[in-house]
Amino acid sequence: MSETELDNVETLADLADLAREAAQDDESVLVFIEQEDAWFAVLRVDGEEDPRIFVSDGAAAARSSYGSILTDELLDRVGDADFDDLDSLVTDLDDEDADQNAEDDDEDEAAGATGPGGVPVGPLGDPELLIEFGLPAEGLLDLSGEGAMPGDALSEIADAIGCGEVLEAVR
């Protein structure tokens, strides 16, 4: 992991190409993005496969240039997959969580919990992208919860997967 120059990144493909350039052999590359303690994202690039993305707060991310690259891609994937709604982007973890999420979704819909372009407020993307590194989906979702500070969350994620010192070195 290293700090990478992002000045010429305009698309997800540009970002994925930068990550692939940083890869040794065909190892996975993780890209951590944080915007002023408003949101964070983790992008995982495995060889030539499509990048996997997790964003802590889709609506907040959609308001920034790098975040909108990620949220636009996630929303395009939903459109391409013919999903009925955006809730399909984050998987329910078990029946109890599903029931609670349904209640929360009803409350969010009533409150109009979407941001620019109808991007949902809250976690968006693949919460399972770090399982192979030792961080379960539940852990990633917990770090994205209400009141969580994105900078602290990224530090906890990096510590959990064994690269905390490297992250702190590039901050």
Image (cartoon, rainbow, N blue to C red):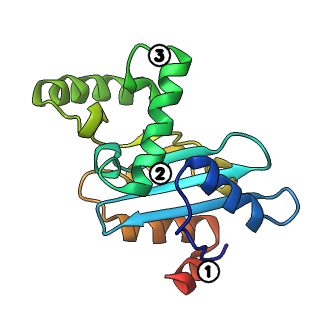
Mark 3–mark 1 Cα distance, whole angstroms, equals 38 Å
In this picture, residue 75 sits left or right of residue 39: right
What amino acid is at disc 2? Leu
Residue at the extreme right = 25
Looking at the image, is mark 3 or mark 1 earlier in the sequence? 3
What amino acid is at disc 1? Val
Residue 112 locus on image (x, y percent): 15, 30
Which numbered mark, 3 or 1, is in the foreground of this view?
A: 3
What amino acid is at disc 3? Phe
Residue at the extreme bottom = 169
Q: Which residue is mark 1?
A: 166
Relative to the observer, which residue lies in front, 121 or 103?
121
Q: Quadrant of the N terminus?
A: bottom right
Residue 98 visible from this viewpoint: yes
Q: Which residue is mark 3?
A: 83
Q: Secondary structure beneath disc 2?
A: helix
Residue drawn at x 38%, y 70% as measured from the top left: 151
Residue drawn at x 29%, y 61% as measured from the top left: 38
